Amino acid sequence: MWRNPSHPDRPLHALVRPPGPALFTAIRDALDGDGPAVLPLSPGHSIGAIASLRPTHADGEALDGGAGVPDDVAVVIATSGSTGAPKGVMLSATALRTSAAASLRRVEASKGDRWLCCLPVAHVSGLQVLVRALLSGSEPIIHSGFDPHAVLSSGADHVSLVPTQLHRLVELGADLSVFRTILLGGAAPRAGLLDQARDLGARIVTTYGMSETCGGCVYDGLPLYGVDLKIGDDGLIRISGAVLFSGYRFADPPMPLDGGWFVTSDLGELHGGRLRVLGRADDVINTGGEKVVAGAVTAVLATHPEVADVAVIGTPDPEWGEAVTAVVVPVTPDTPPTLSQLRAYCRDRLPPHAAPRGLRLVPRLPLLPNGKTDLMRLRAGT
């Protein structure tokens, strides 16, 4: 047992190792209280990159200047804010189990069902696959990376994917009914992807959440059991419930809540209790005195027949302040859509100021490890 009454703080062990049985055991022991709290990191991740999180140990070796975590914290997830500076999201065993139990309940998973983990455990989406397996009383199937053929032949009942991974399975024309459930999150799927996957037999459940909510807490637009949603006057999505994190490591205040509600950075709408995510507030583009939600423009352009993939960013402009710029992966590189074609397509679908004023053609969009588009690289032009 890790507990020592004379030292109330719990040790925090950074684990830089590939997904596998050893990592699963460390997470299980952290949740059960039989081991230290863990900070899972992807292989190749530099300890120096998360030095500000000050773990007490790294792969079993004590570190100078490390600091423990509160007694109830089992896992710390390193996540980056809009500045790119790492934040330590502290998650309790209670919150993680509550989230996993609500997820199993919603997808009607059975005791003993097998879960496939092919997402990085350093991200909450991969971590929660392991917690669901723990609550299911089954050994998780753990892959060190994503290989579509290995995924299809895994024998798992349930799997969590990001849209890029689902796209690769769809490209194979595979029988996706081999999974009872595909949880899909991390980013908005491109237009038509869900229909294509369902035509191949997939039972897809779209998820919305973040590290601060122990991962997905809204399934197909509806909150999980014990989770409450509301939209503030500022348009931001607010979440409450037992799935919330215990605070940010070394932050002041550690737990930034608004009357018990966690205020996300996402804009949303509620219709009949069902959530529609509009985009991130920090992705709002100020152009000519008008505000444009980049996600709304992305959603429209993604339905253009000549657009395979797209992201929308604001680029500096001497006249407009910021120009709405579409970064497009064309379906046919030799005959890509033109800016005038994209603007005409938006004419009846968006306000005039939201139509793109710039177009950049790329062979593919840069992605973060969690499957989201790397907007910082796009804004930097790399």
Image (cartoon, grey):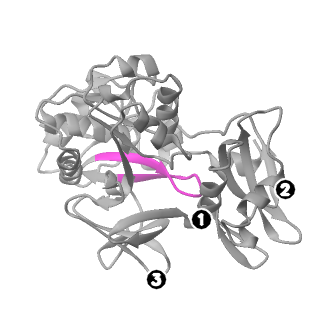
What's drawn in magenta, residue-wise? 75-89
**Residue at 24%, 27% in the rendered image:** 140
Q: Which residue is mark 1?
A: 282
Q: Nearer the viewer, mark 3 or mark 2?
A: 2
Q: Amino acid at mark 1?
A: Asp
Q: Quadrant of residue 117?
A: top left
Q: Which residue is mark 2?
A: 340
Disc 1 secondary structure class: helix
**Comes first in the chain, label 1 or label 2:** 1
**Residue at 18%, 42% in the rendered image:** 31
Q: Nearer the viewer, mark 1 or mark 3?
A: 3
Q: Residues within 10 Å of mark 2 (few under 14, many from 20)?
A: some
Q: Position of residue 87 (x, y in %)?
A: 46, 53
Q: Quadrant of residue 135?
A: top left
Identify whether 188 is placed above or below 130. below
Q: Nearer the viewer, residue 312 or 297?
A: 297
Query: In the current view of this chain or complex, which residue is farthest to the right?
Result: 318
Q: Is residue 8 visible?
A: no
Q: Position of residue 105 (x, y in %)?
A: 17, 48
Q: Determine whether, in the image, residue 230 is placed left or right of residue 288.
A: left
C-alpha separation, residue under disc 1 versus residue under disc 3? 16 Å
Q: Nearer the viewer, residue 345 or 27?
A: 345
Q: Quadrant of residue 256?
A: bottom left
Q: Position of residue 216 (x, y in %)?
A: 34, 51
Q: Determine whether, in the image, residue 143 is placed left or right of residue 359.
A: left
Q: Determine whether, in the image, residue 156 is placed left or right of residue 112.
A: right
**Comes first in the chain, label 3 or label 2:** 3
Q: Residues within 10 Å of mark 3 (few under 14, many from 20)?
A: few
Q: Is residue 283 magenta?
A: no
Disc 2 secondary structure class: helix
Q: Residues within 10 Å of mark 1 (few under 14, many from 20)?
A: few
Q: Position of residue 172 (x, y in %)?
A: 50, 22
